[in-house]
């Protein structure tokens, strides 16, 4: 083998094939996305927060001294020079950043408050919903430095988006808006199914096929990718089969101790094993049902878990299967233990809640809790608050431009996504501990300007059209592209000029919509005899009556043949 390599070197052959050109990335490409708000956080926060921020500043100074080496060898070199390998603070500095918040990318495309955020299991795609009625799909791998979504649409007309959840397999996501009908879309934003709404005139909620009031939240089953639940203001939680859009599987009717025995269910969720369904209500109650029960009454209940009349923004089960985290509209975050479901384990108050959909989530390592705190003054800055899971004490506070409403911490890419009240989506990450996601944007440079040399000959040169040529000599229209592109454009309703679909729900844009009972009347069996022409209906049997008469068959043998006088004879007599 060595002789062969020597022979190839003598002949001037360095290898087989063309050597691939590897792109050299700028090692300082993440510096432009580094957060600058840390100075403001240090100046306006407590002493504990200053102690958290100071080591980060020292790390930046140490990185600037050398010719961009990795951070760990630099710190090890400092330890060897000081000859203090047993010094404990240096061992703590050896650890990676505590939270992935050193850098940020801002996605600006919504115009109003972000009310829903959904990330798929791989962290490659994200869907956001807002009070501007729009849903937007983002692809981190396909975005450039302009940070624009690849699809925008209105799922339900002029209704707010309440919740968005990707399925566990990442192939589809649920969309819940202010209407009574949840919808399922595929990962490209194409609608797969719209689920039925119930009859608003039926009092018993168990006898309706769907929700009769606005849907507030949704959750997928952690084990079964075809089962999901939705909660609504009609005081029910409904279990659906994704393949059956005509009727839900099971109805959980939430009974309140208030007058009328009904309450708005603001949030719902599954436990990690799928054996518990949790629901938070407007009357402050927190309920738990076992999925193996008949759902007549909850298995565990806490009355006045949060202040009555405030929306419970989120209900999250921990991966330890024992603790539950709730974010209430009463400016508190509470931690509950399922083994002693009576009083909260810990409570953190003073978190200003300006939007009812404000949520709180666990960190991927299940050690911290992150939530948003609203601005104290109009137009002021909000805070992302990191809490210790076990006692809910504040560990770190991060200043952001506006009030954080929705927060998501993805476990695979280790990045924090938060939606603000000004319509911005901020992705926080660390170049050291995070993977892909927003880091992919820094690996791409700004889009290069198109020159004349980049354009193909089909665009620059004049096109000769030969419509009557034989198929084997016919040139395709260069603007149409390939077959795959044509099929993709066919799916786009704008490019294919698909007619507008019938309006469902209230009218919009001058078009009259369906009434509250029209969907019920359409399902009834209608008598269509009034719409049939009677003459055509009788003439259908003319041929059959001539061939096989039933009532005049007795005269068929001796019936005389009719003889008609000709018109010519009459005319002659008249003359």
Image (cartoon, helix red, strand yellow):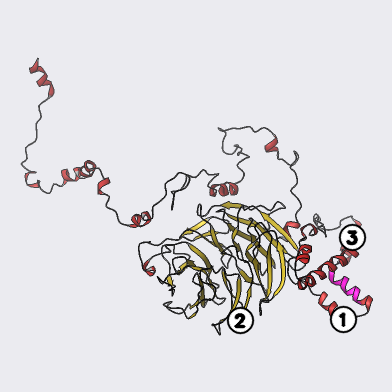
Q: Is there a contact, CB below 8 Å, between mark 3 and mark 1?
A: no
Label 1 secondary element: loop
Q: Which residue is painted at 82% across and 59% down in the image?
A: 28
Q: Which of 14 and 484 is in front in this view?
A: 484
Q: Position of residue 422 (x, y in %)?
A: 64, 56
Q: Position of residue 67 (x, y in %)?
A: 90, 63
Q: Nearer the viewer, residue 265 or 165?
A: 265
Task: Quadrant for residue 253, please give it.
Answer: bottom left
Q: Relative to 516, is 158 on the left or the right?
A: right
Asked if one can make out residue 492 in the rendered structure from this viewpoint, the answer is yes
Callout 3 crowding tier (Cα within 10 Å): few <14, some 14–19, many ≥20: few
Asked if one can make out residue 436 in the rendered structure from this viewpoint, the answer is no
Task: Quadrant for residue 317, please give it.
Answer: bottom right
Q: Which residue is painted at 57% across and 49% down in the image?
A: 488
Vertical placement of 511 versus 339: above or below?
above
Q: Main SS type for the magenta part?
A: helix
Label 2 secondary element: loop
């Amino acid at each position: 083998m060595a002789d062969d390599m020597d022979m190839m070197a003598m002949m001037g052959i360095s290898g087989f094939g063309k050597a691939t050109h590897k792109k050299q990335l700028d090692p300082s490409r993440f510096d432009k996305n580094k957060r600058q708000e840390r100075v403001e956080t240090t100046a306006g926060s407590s002493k504990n927060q200053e102690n958290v921020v100071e080591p980060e500043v020292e790390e930046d100074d140490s990185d600037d001294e050398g010719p961009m080496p990795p951070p760990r060898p630099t710190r090890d070199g400092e330890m060897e020079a000081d000859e203090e390998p047993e010094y404990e603070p240096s061992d703590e500095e050896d650890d990676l950043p505590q939270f992935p918040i050193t850098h940020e990318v801002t996605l600006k495309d919504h115009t109003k408050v972000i009310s829903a955020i959904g990330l798929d299991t791989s962290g490659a795609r994200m869907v956001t919903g807002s009070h501007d009625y729009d849903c937007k799909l983002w692809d981190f791998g396909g975005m450039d430095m302009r940070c624009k979504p690849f699809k925008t649409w209105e799922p339900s007309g002029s209704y707010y988006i309440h919740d968005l959840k990707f399925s566990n397999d990442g192939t589809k996501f649920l969309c819940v808006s202010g209407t009574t009908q949840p919808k399922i879309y595929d990962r490209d934003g194409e609608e797969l199914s719209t689920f039925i709404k119930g009859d608003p005139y039926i009092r018993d909620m168990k006898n309706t096929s769907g929700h009769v009031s606005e849907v507030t939240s949704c959750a997928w089953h952690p084990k079964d990718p075809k089962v999901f639940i939705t909660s609504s203001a009609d005081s029910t939680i409904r279990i659906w089969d994704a393949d059956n859009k005509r009727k839900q599987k099971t109805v959980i009717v939430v009974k309140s101790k208030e007058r009328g025995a009904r309450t708005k269910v603001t949030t719902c969720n599954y436990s990690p094993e799928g054996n518990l369904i949790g629901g938070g209500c407007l009357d402050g109650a927190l309920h738990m049902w076992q999925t193996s029960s008949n759902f007549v009454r909850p298995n565990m209940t806490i009355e006045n878990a949060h202040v009555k009349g405030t929306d419970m923004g989120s209900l999250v089960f921990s991966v330890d299967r024992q603790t539950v985290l709730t974010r209430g509209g009463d400016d508190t975050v509470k931690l509950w233990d399922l083994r002693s479901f009576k009083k909260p384990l810990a409570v953190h108050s003073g978190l200003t809640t300006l939007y009812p959909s404000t949520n709180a989530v666990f960190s991927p390592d299940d050690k911290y809790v992150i939530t948003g705190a609203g601005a104290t003054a109009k137009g002021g800055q909000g805070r992302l608050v990191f809490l210790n899971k076990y006692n809910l004490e504040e560990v770190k506070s991060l200043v952001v431009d506006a009030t954080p409403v929705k927060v998501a911490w993805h476990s695979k890419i280790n990045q924090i996504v938060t939606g603000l009240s000004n319509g911005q989506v901020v992705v926080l990450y660390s170049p050291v501990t995070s993977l892909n996601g927003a880091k992919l944007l820094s690996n791409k440079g700004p889009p290069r300007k198109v020159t004349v040399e980049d354009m193909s000959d089909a665009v620059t040169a004049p096109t000769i059209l030969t419509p009557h040529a034989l198929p084997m000599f016919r040139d395709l229209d260069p603007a149409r592209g390939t077959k795959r592109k044509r099929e993709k454009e066919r799916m786009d309703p704008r490019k294919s000029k698909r007619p507008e679909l019938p309006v469902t729900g209230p009218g919009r844009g001058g078009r009259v919509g369906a009434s509250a009972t029209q969907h019920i009347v359409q399902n009834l069996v209608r008598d269509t005899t009034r719409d049939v022409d009677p003459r055509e209906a009788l003439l259908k049997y003319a041929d059959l009556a001539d061939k096989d008469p039933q009532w005049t068959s007795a005269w068929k043998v001796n019936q005389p043949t009719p003889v008609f006088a000709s018109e010519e004879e009459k005319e002659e007599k008249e003359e």
